[in-house]
Amino acid sequence: MQRLSPQVNRIPEFVEFEHRKDGILAFLIEPQFTMTDTLRALYGDAAEAIGANTWARHPNETAATIVWLADHPDAARFAGGNQMINAPDFFANNDIDPAAAVES
């Protein structure tokens, strides 16, 4: 298996440098171990063991974080790739109320 270069994590930084003036923000998002329909279909009950003793997260947890980052006016403070965003725990880690997360 080929290892990814640590430079891959710098992509959001470079996108920010080039495009922030255009209103484009970039984020470094970690979805954690996420149980998907594909994993369940491929591995059945054994899918739960894939996470190596890590409890599987639901895709909606990461989706909610991405929606907030795409829509919320305060999202810019998390942009630039200088911090890895733990998507499933994003709201709890940042004291954000997910019920009021996306403003109309």
Image (spheres, grey):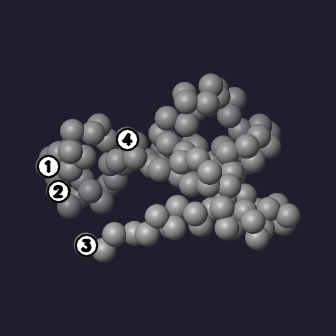
Residues packed near mark 3 inside 10 Å, few (<14), some (14 to 19) or many (20 plus): few
Q: Is residue 76 left or right of residue 63?
A: right
Mark 4 or mark 1: which comes first in sequence? 1
Marked residue nearer the N-terminal end (2 or 3): 3
Q: From this viewpoint, which residue is outermost toward the left?
A: 46
Residue occupying the far right of the picture: 21
Circle 1 sits on which residue? 46
The residue where tag 2 is placed is: 43
| Cβ atoms at labels 2 and 3 below 8 Å apart | no
Q: What residue type is labelled 2?
A: Tyr
Labels 2 and 1 touching (C-beta < 8 A):
yes
| Image x and y of residue 56, in percent | 31, 41
Q: Earlier in the sequence, mark 3 or mark 1?
A: 3
Height in image: 3 above or below 89? below
* Label annotation for residue 57: 4
* Along the line of sight, the residue nearer the viewer: 50 or 44: 50
- Determine which residue is flagged by label 3: 1
Q: Which quadrant would the N terminus be assigned to in this image?
A: bottom left
- Residue occupying the point 30% across, 74% down: 2
